Image: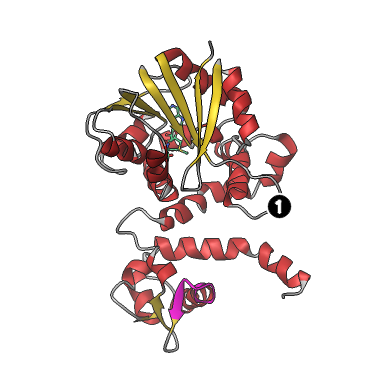
Amino acid sequence: MPMPSQKIMRLGLGFVVSQAMRVVIELRIPDLLASGEQAVDDLATATRTNADGLYRVMRLLASEGVFKEGAPRHFELTELGAALRSDRPGPGDFVQMINSEAYLAFEQLLYSVRTGKPAFDKLFGSPRFDWLSQHPEQAELFQRAMVALSQGSNEAVAEAYDFSPFTRVVDVGGGHGQLLSEILARNPHLSGVLFDLPLGVAAARQGAGGNLPRTELIAGDFFESVPSGDLYVVKKVVHDWDDERATEILRNCRRAMRPGGKVLVAETIVPPGDEPNQIKGIDVVMLAVTGGLERTEAHYANLFEAAGLRFERAIQTQGPISILEASAQA
Ligand SMILES: C[S@@+](CC[C@H](N)C(=O)[O-])C[C@H]1O[C@@H](n2cnc3c(N)ncnc32)[C@H](O)[C@@H]1O
């Protein structure tokens, strides 16, 4: 057992590892190591970096299990490191995204704790999604990070719900489109609508989340209105917003919904107690970056009610995500 002071120092050094990961991902070191072990001097030449500086970062990450130092100053990929290769969306996209602008906003987390407002807006002069709309490269990385973050969850949502009574499913804030792709692949009777800001729709159009047959891609603002359909899927969107804004999105689904329609909010529920859970970290990211929050089941039920919807039931999927189903209030 480490002494309390050592444990505290390790916790306090968390940013060192996360920023070191970002550096090796940006330099594409995992790609360079894909064919086998390499000397750090060769990696430094290939990436035009300082060999000693790179060595120290690689040694740190080897101590965390991302690389393995075999012969002195020679590194190879471990299973963890291999997951950081860039040939498909993966956790490296998330690490890179969260350690960029979001990391800078986090330096001002105390501002968010004092005011309840996102530090991101103060630092960057506009809200997160407006800022992304002005920065296409970062928006593309954001969508890849969302695909990575969704691994396991999209299939789990598509598997856990009976889509047979519906005809037209609208994925509100569907971004890259992977959830819709999984739903449509399992339900050939359904047509789909992928609704997002222009940059999210662009990612879906490029196939970032997979095939989207029988799908209309519609760009718009869910605070104004959403397209008509009989099933609304809203995954990892409500958590980006405070209660007032989240209610507006759900109310717009309620307004556009055909009779007998349903709204499915797919989110990770904050568990009670002190157990470690990634969602508690994501919740604090929401505080500093978007102004949103992670919620309990009772909190989601209140949002539905405020939006004119009736909370029907929560379905725990096989993944780390729940489906909260609501229908129109009578
Ligand atoms: C956290 S991502 C979730 C994406 C996807 N549903 C998923 O589960 O991976 C939130 C999505 O909401 C979209 N979004 C943000 N503001 C929006 C707005 N005003 N209107 C429509 N979409 C918006 C973003 O572009 C992004 O794709």
Left or right of 281: which side holds 172? left
Amino acid marked by disc 1: Asp
Ligand 1 rendered quadrant: top left
* Numbered range of the magenta stretch: 61-68
Q: Residue 79 at x, y = what percent? A: 41, 70
As drawn, 72 above or below 198: below
Q: Front-most of 42 and 267?
A: 267
Label 1 sits on residue? 274
Query: For the residue labelled by badge 1, is the local secondary structure a helix, a strand or a loop?
Result: loop
Which image quarter holds the N terminus? bottom right
Q: Residue 254 at x, y = what percent? A: 47, 16
Q: Residue at x 60, y 60 (%)?
A: 15
Q: Front-most of 28 and 81?
A: 81
Q: Residue 33 at x, y = what percent? A: 34, 73
**Which residue appears farthest toward the bottom when viewing the image?**
71
Within 10 angstroms of label 1, few (less than 14), some, or many (20 or more) residues? Answer: few
Queried whether the magenta region covers residue 19, the answer comes back as: no
Q: Residue at x 65, y 31 (%)?
A: 298
Q: Residue 42 at x, y = what percent? A: 34, 79
As drawn, 93 above or below 196: below
Q: Residue at x 64, y 30 (%)?
A: 299
As drawn, 115 above or below 254: below
